[in-house]
Each structure stands twice: as C-alpha cells, then as structure tokens.
Image (tube, rainbow, N blue to C red):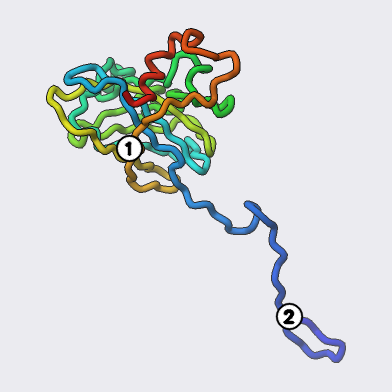
Amino acid sequence: AIKSAEGTWEDFPSAAIVRDVGDKAPLKVYGATFRTKRIGQSVPYPSALNEIGVTLSFNIPIPSAARPRVIISGLRGALPYGTSPDPLDASQFPLRSASPMPQCTGMMRHQGWLGCGAFGIVTGNRTVGCSASWIQASSDLAIDIINDLDAETDYAFTFTIRNPPKAQSAAVPRVELQGNVPILPKISMDRDATVNLQDLGPSVTDCNVCEQALPYWHLWAGA
C-alpha cells in the first residue's frame, strides 16, 4: 500500500514484469530427450565375435556430477567378450572408441568429442573409464557417464560380444537414462543402417587414407 496526498492508504497497482526473451525467460525449461540412439553390428554369423556400435546424443547437456547412468536392454542371447578393465569386478568389460583414427569416426562434431572416454563404471570412489557392466540376469548393459556431455553432440563407442549359437531374429534394444538428471524413460533404439561420413575432412578422400578405420566403416553400415 502507498499513502496518498490526502493521507489515506491505497493499494499499489500491480503490473506485469517485463521478462527476458529466449532461454533467459524465467522458468523456461526444455524437455529432455535422446537426440540420437543408434545401434548396429559388424557380424551376423552364429557364435562369431561381433562388434556392437552405439551412438548417443541428448538435446540438453548431461553433467557427470549428476551421476547419470545409461541402461541398454534387450540384448538377448549376447555374451560380452573381453577382459575386465577392473581387476576387482569381473562383470565389467571394455568399451572402445568408434575408430582408432579420430578423423575417420564420422562423428567429430567439435573438439569435445570423447568417444568411449565419456563412459565408464563408477563404484564408490573408483572410476574405470571406457568400461561397461553386464547384468547377466536381464541381458542389460549398464554404463555410467563419467565426463560432462554437451548437448546436440554424438558420443560413440563399440564393444565386443559373442553371438548366440543359433539363428534368431534381430533384437530390439531399448535405452534409458537414470540418475540425478531428467530421467529419460526406456525407448527403442534405432538400427544403424547408414555409413556416417558427412564429417570427414577434405584430406580424407578415400578408404586408403583411413585404412585402420575400415572395419568400423563396415560396422556403422550395420552389415
């Protein structure tokens, strides 16, 4: 209330606050979602060692301080292959970046691209990078995000499994995000069916330049 010239108290009229625009507008909140959720393989043959490739991105930044964890489910019949990077936990197995040659990944959105280095397993105060945990009972893959992830940026990794010994139809993997971040509910992943070469630099003109990356080009083709 305010005091008038006549000495009476009157209500002060309300007024709308002029708000900022765009992302600075108060209480504007983006809905969190997976922007990319691709998965592919390299070998379709029974009992063969098979490289599985995963590419993930989000429409918002994902801070590692929020203890985010990615769960990929539906990998029925798969048997993870490789020596555990953590001698104290035999359930872990190694992740690798999509290509040993960064200029051949086809995923270098900017200098912050981390490949498998964005992911690992956190147990108490111990963090093991480029590592995942296999949940045998449910055939789920659990991966902690151990580095901050930028929005609208692809992060990719591969891991090796042994295929089932008998023929089966393609799995339908699903992915979800857990932790102290916006929880992203379980959603079906997209089958990786195209080679992603749009980000190759002008010096990379043919496969001979990226000979070490050839198996990974095959992998991302989903063959």
**Dot 2, how many residues are within 10 Å of its Cα: few (below 14), some (14-19), or many (20+)?**
few
Residue that lies at the very extreme toward the right in this rendered image: 5
Q: Which mark is residue 13?
A: 2
Q: Name the residue beneath numbered marker 1.
A: 71
Q: Is residue 82 visible?
A: yes
Horizontally, residue 189 falls left or right of residue 97, namely left
Between label 1 and label 2, give the one nearer the viewer: 1
Q: Is residue 114 visible?
A: no
Horizontal and vertical percent position of residue 206: 50, 13
Q: Which mark is residue 202?
A: none
Q: Is residue 175 above or below residue 88?
A: below
Q: Quadrant of residue 132?
A: top left
**Which secondary structure lies at badge 1?**
strand
Horizontally, residue 31 falls left or right of residue 123, namely right
Horizontal and vertical percent position of residue 178: 37, 43
Q: Quadrant of residue 205?
A: top right
The mark total stands at: 2
Horizontal and vertical percent position of residue 77: 18, 29
